[in-house]
Amino acid sequence: MSAPPKKKNPWTPMAAGCIAGAIEATAVWPMEFIKTQLQLQSKAKGAALPYNGMISGLSYYVRTTGFFSLYRGLTPTLIGSMPKAGIRFGLNALIKDNLRDKDGKLTPGKNFVSGLGAGVAEALIIVAPVETVKTKCIELNQPFVTGMKHILQTEGLSGIYKGAAPTAMKQGSNQGLRFMWFNEYKRIVTNDGEKQMTPLLGLAGGMSAGCFSTLGNNPFDVVKTRMQGTSASQYTGTLDCFKQVLSKEGVGAFYAGVVPRLGRVVPGQGIIFMSFETIVSNLEKFTIFQ
């Protein structure tokens, strides 16, 4: 029986996650911008956007307000992306190390729990406040500082944490599904670590993990977005939001924005997992990260 693998330095995945998170957020932000706009549109209120999909949305903003308007709301997300991804990858690695059996193995269930724990932690520490400011900046068409001042003046400090519960549900299920898929994929393509994970394999694994998690938890993403929007006061809580969306708009509303979300998440997860794997292998060359 081979000896279980040595536990890795927890700072390595955290540092690699920070760098990979910044790369991913910048690369795919326009998709997130359009996805958020589509999800804030409520059929029950008769609201309508001048576009109905990812391509038409991108074209509309480039044509009417310029290319850089697609990056409105990026600042709070970019500020949060580095520590968010650092917490996600660092804590996931830490939980995995503590869940391994005597042979160092992990079941898909344990990989899901590791991702779930990391996702809930990043949601409560970083994602909830950053996503709330981002959503309201986009909805109000305001820059970061102005949007932050508006939230503090109208709702107080608690306004920044609107939608924390659905955010934790979304992030937890998101990362649980992603890490479960990716770690199983990595185990198969590397033959339990005997082969090297190439950047191309990392890209493919991350993209497939992003697709799997998006289709699995888009309803949580829709509810999170509604709860963080400027009309969140019409809902008494997360469950009430679920009920109102279902009764007034139907099941299909839970998959509003799923196409642009896939357009953002699939390449985004490909980029972040590919970057993470490549950055880790390079950081481990330095003594401090070994």
Image: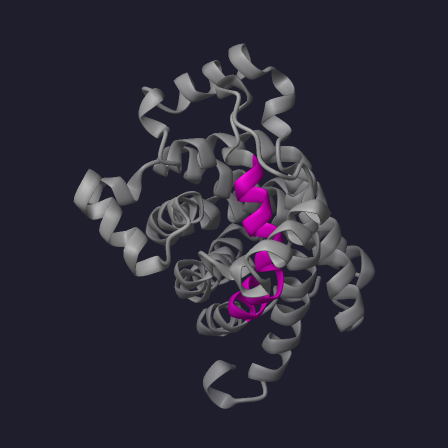
Residue 140 drawn at (x, y percent)? 39, 45
Depth order, front residue of 105/126: 126
Q: Residue at x 46, y 36 (%)?
A: 225
Depth order, front residue of 95/12: 12
Please identify the quarter of the rendering in which residue 2 is found. bottom right
Q: Residue at x 53, y 65 (%)?
A: 21
Quadrant in the picture for the N terminus: bottom right
Magenta-highlighted residues? 20-38
Depth order, front residue of 80/138: 138
Residue 156 in view, yes or no: no
Left or right relative to 83: residue 170 = right
Left or right relative to 267: residue 232 = left
Left or right relative to 165: residue 21 = right
Residue 205 in view, yes or no: yes
Left or right relative to 84: residue 145 = left
Residue 31 drawn at (x, y percent)? 62, 52
Q: Residue at x 29, y 60 (%)?
A: 145
Q: How many marks?
A: 0
Residue 29 among those drawn in magenta: yes
Please name the predominant secondary structure of the magenta segment in the image: helix
Please identify the quarter of the rendering in which residue 238 is found. top left
Chosen colour scheme: one colour
Residue 232 drawn at (x, y percent)? 35, 29
Residue that protrudes farthest toward the front in the picture = 64
Residue 130 among those drawn in magenta: no
Residue 209 drawn at (x, y percent)? 70, 49
192 is higher (above) or lower (below) than 238: below
